[in-house]
Each structure stands twice: as structure tokens, then as C-alpha cells.
């Protein structure tokens, strides 16, 4: 809000030039917060070793201060500074998937501030693959703490404009890296306990992890045999805090419902018949189309679907609809992370945001 005479306005979006990247790094060094593109979603970045800067993240997001943050590193070479122990399998996965959308939860090194870890004895670490994120990390030269750059409980931003919509002048600047290629948040894999466990599904699937370490990780919320357990209940009491694991998260303001394919057209038409404005995210467009409904055709390919998901939910939310109906997803490993986000979006949707 404060503007020195001649100072550049806060919340501005800058194209990803070397000048802008240097400026972003200087702002981070000065203890400010900036919007950073990554391949998954945009992050709200701060110097991970500066507790006062990290506290600005919580204030800007409206996020509870005991929720830990992911630290982004320029490369796996930085791991020893942040993690007290690096299990062999964790290192193998870092080698296989970094830079990329995998976050490893490891025992923290003593230097990592409590503000970053939420007071826990672990820290989340990842090396993002977006070239602008990597450039910012290399110029900055140390760990950057960055949650998704949305207000707490809301839809994660996948463009620079979304970050400005969410956070406005709360950020010093947003570096524009274009639309995020993956579109949903990284897979979080906890290595701090007896067996590796996926706390949040993402583009790196349990099957892909198993191919590297020779065993399938446990998956939070999945029964031991592989099926779905009663959602998010089992070991919640002992679980580390993961806001992405709250039942209500990633949520639009408009009530959102998942509907089986065969019922979609009829349910949408019935709501429209009652005078409701209905936005529909479907795998295809119906023929003939009901002009009272706002249809968005979603891609058939899961990677493309994930890439468009949050922008589509954001658009649906902006249409002032009374309901968002989303066609149920196909089965299969590649759809699981998307189903996870849509499930939480459905629970969290409507008037009151999560938390
Ligand atoms: O793809 C991503 O991971 C994006 C981009 C910006 O890198 N970041 C992201 O951050 O999604 P955030 O804060 O929105 O979600 C990170 C999740 C949170 O649910 C947090 O609780 C969990 O990671 N987390 C972070 N550190 C943890 C730790 N030490 N133990 C357990 N969970 C942790
Ligand atoms: Mg988030």
C-alpha cells in the first residue's frame, strides 16, 4: 500500500527478464514477498531463512501460522543444508524427479526456522523445473519458502494474473512465467517416518515412485490394499499438518458438485429449469447444447485436464453461476491427483472458505 515517491507500485506483474529476476531476488533479500512461477502452480516466495519474511507469507495468505511451507532449492546439492538426514531412497527420487513436481519431507536441519516448519521436526523440500523459478533460485542462491500464491483455502493460481487477483498489493511483484505446465501442486512424499507415504497426490504417481525405489509408497487416505479408505480419517491425529490434506480446500466460492456422466445433462437441465445459472465442466459438449447452461469442454488427456483445471474453476466461479457441475473423472492412476483436488473443491465450495 505504501508508495515512496518514484517507487514502483506493489503487486505489479513483470515479464521474466533478467532485470526482473534480479529485482525479485533483491526484494527477497530485503525480506519482501514476491509471486514466483513454478511448473505446478504459482508460489508466494520469501527468503526461507528470514522468519520475518516468512511471517509475511502467512499474513498475505491468511493461513494459520502452524502450517509448514515448502522450501524450494536451486538444486539437490543444497539438500544437506536443509535436511538432517537424507535416506538413500529419497536421494534416488531427487535424482530421478528433480527438477520437478515432487516434494520430499525430511528431518529438518537445525538452521531451518520454526516459521517454515510449523514447529515440526521435518521440512518439505523441492527443486522446481520452471526455468524462471530456477533462475530466481540461482540468482537468490538459497532456499525460497513458497506456498501456493492463493488466499488460504482458495483455488491455486496458475497464471500471474491469478496471483494478482488473489493477493494484489500484498506481494511486491509477480514474475510472469506464463501459464503453469502441470497445473496442480507437487506430489508430497513423507520420508520422515517408518515407510514413505504420499501425503498429497500429484503428477508424480505412486507407480512412478515405485519404479525408482522398488516399492510402492503408502498413500494417505488409501486402504492398505490400494482402495480408498474412509476419506482423510484414519491416522489424521498423528499426521503432520498438511493444509492440502484438509477435506475442504482448493475451493471455488460457487457450490461445486461432481456428477456421473450419464446424469450430467439431465441434472444440469433440471437446475437450469428451476432458474439456476449453471456452469458445467464436462469431457465434451452435448449436442444439441442447452443455451441456459455454460459448458466448458475439458481435455480427455489427464495431464492437459490438470493443466486447465484451476483456471477453469476460476472462470466458472467468475460467471456468477449458482452451481458448478463437474463431470465425474475416469478411473486410473493419472486421474487420482485431479480427483483429489476436485473432491476437496466440492467440500470447500460455497459461501464459507476453509479455515
Ligand atoms: O507444487 C507445489 O508444491 C506448490 C509450488 C508453489 O511449489 N506449493 C504448494 O505449497 O503447494 P502449499 O504450501 O500450498 O502446500 C504445501 C503443502 C501444505 O499442505 C503443507 O502443509 C505441506 O505441504 N507441508 C509443507 N511442509 C511440510 C512438512 N514438513 N510436513 C508435512 N507437510 C508439509
Ligand atoms: Mg496451497
Image (tube, rainbow, N blue to C red):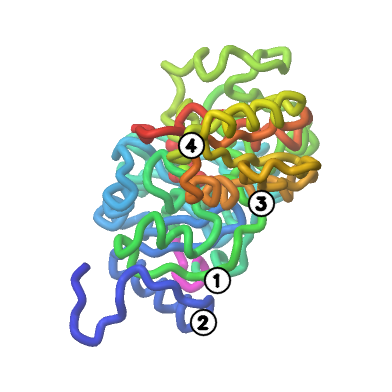
Q: What label does residue 307 carry, if any?
A: 3
* Residue 42 coordinates in the image, percent (x, y): 51, 57
Tell us which disc is closer to us: 2 or 4. Answer: 4
Instruction: Decide: few, some or many residues near mark 4? Use Cα within 10 Å; few <14, some 14-19, many ≥20.
Output: many
Q: Secondary structure at mark 3?
A: helix
Q: Earlier in the sequence, mark 4 or mark 1?
A: 1
Tell us which disc is closer to us: 4 or 1. Answer: 4
Q: Earlier in the sequence, mark 2 or mark 1?
A: 2
Main secondary structure type of the part rendered in magenta: helix
Instruction: Give the distance between the C-alpha atoms of the residues marked 3 and 1, in whole angstroms.
Output: 22 Å
Magenta segment: 137-142
Name the residue at 46% across, 50% down: 148
Q: Is residue 44 above or below residue 107?
A: below
* Residue 254 coordinates in the image, percent (x, y): 46, 38
Q: Earlier in the sequence, mark 3 or mark 1?
A: 1
Whether residue 80 is visible to the viewer of this picture, yes or no, is no
Instruction: Give the distance between the C-alpha atoms of the residues marked 2 and 4, in whole angstroms.
Output: 44 Å
Q: Tell me: is circle 3 under 8 Å from ligand 1.
A: no
The residue to which callout 2 is attached is 18
The reply to whether discs 2 and 3 touch (Cβ–Cβ < 8 Å) is: no
Instruction: Give the distance between the C-alpha atoms of the residues marked 4 and 1, in whole angstroms.
Output: 42 Å
Q: Is residue 155 above or below residue 233?
A: below
Q: Quadrant of the N terminus?
A: bottom left
Q: Secondary structure at mark 1?
A: helix
The residue to which callout 1 is attached is 135
The reply to whether discs 2 and 1 touch (Cβ–Cβ < 8 Å) is: yes
The residue to which callout 4 is attached is 322
Amino acid at each position: 500500500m505504501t508508495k515512496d515517491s518514484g517507487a514502483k507500485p506493489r503487486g505489479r506483474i513483470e515479464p521474466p527478464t533478467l532485470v526482473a529476476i534480479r529485482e525479485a531476488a533483491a526484494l527477497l533479500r530485503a525480506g519482501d514477498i514476491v509471486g514466483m512461477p513454478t511448473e505446478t502452480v504459482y508460489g508466494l516466495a520469501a527468503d526461507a531463512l528470514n522468519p520475518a519474511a516468512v511471517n509475511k507469507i502467512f499474513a498475505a495468505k491468511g493461513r494459520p501460522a502452524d502450517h509448514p511451507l515448502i522450501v524450494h532449492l536451486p538444486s539437490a546439492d543444497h539438500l544437506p543444508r536443509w535436511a538432517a538426514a537424507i535416506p538413500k531412497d529419497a536421494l534416488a527420487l531427487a535424482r530421478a524427479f528433480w527438477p520437478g513436481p515432487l516434494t520430499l519431507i525430511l528431518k529438518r536441519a537445525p538452521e531451518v526456522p520454526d516459521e517454515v516448519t510449523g514447529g515440526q521436526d521435518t521440512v518439505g523440500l523441492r527443486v522446481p523445473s520452471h526455468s524462471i523459478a530456477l533462475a530466481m533460485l540461482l540468482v537468490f542462491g538459497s532456499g525460497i519458502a513458497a506456498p501456493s500464491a492463493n488466499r488460504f483455502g482458495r483455488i491455486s493460481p496458475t497464471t500471474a494474473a491469478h496471483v494478482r487477483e488473489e493477493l494484489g498489493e500484498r506481494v511486491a511483484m509477480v514474475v510472469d512465467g506464463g501459464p503453469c505446465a502441470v497445473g496442480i501442486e507437487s506430489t508430497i512424499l513423507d520420508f520422515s517416518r517408518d515407510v514413505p507415504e504420499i501425503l498429497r497426490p500429484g503428477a508424480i504417481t505412486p507407480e512412478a515412485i515405485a519404479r525408482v525405489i522398488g516399492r510402492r509408497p503408502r498413500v494417505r487416505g488409501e486402504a492398505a490394499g490400494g482402495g480408498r479408505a474412509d476419506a482423510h480419517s484414519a491416522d489424521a491425529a498423528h499426521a503432520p499438518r498438511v493444509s492440502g490434506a484438509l477435506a475442504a480446500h482448493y475451493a471455488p466460492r460457487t457450490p461445486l458438485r461432481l456428477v456421473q456422466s450419464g446424469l450430467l445433462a439431465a441434472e444440469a437441465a433440471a437446475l437450469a429449469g428451476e432458474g439456476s445459472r449453471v456452469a458445467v465442466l464436462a469431457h465434451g459438449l452435448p449436442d444439441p447444447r442447452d443455451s441456459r447452461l455454460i459448458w466448458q469442454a475439458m481435455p480427455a488427456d489427464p495431464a492437459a485436464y490438470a493443466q486447465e483445471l484451476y483456471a477453469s474453476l476460476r472462470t466458472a466461479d467468475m460467471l456468477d453461476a449458482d452451481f458448478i457441475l463437474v463431470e465425474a473423472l475416469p478411473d486410473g492412476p493419472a486421474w487420482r491427483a485431479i480427483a483429489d483436488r476436485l473432491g476437496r473443491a466440492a467440500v470447500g465450495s460455497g459461501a464459507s472458505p476453509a479455515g
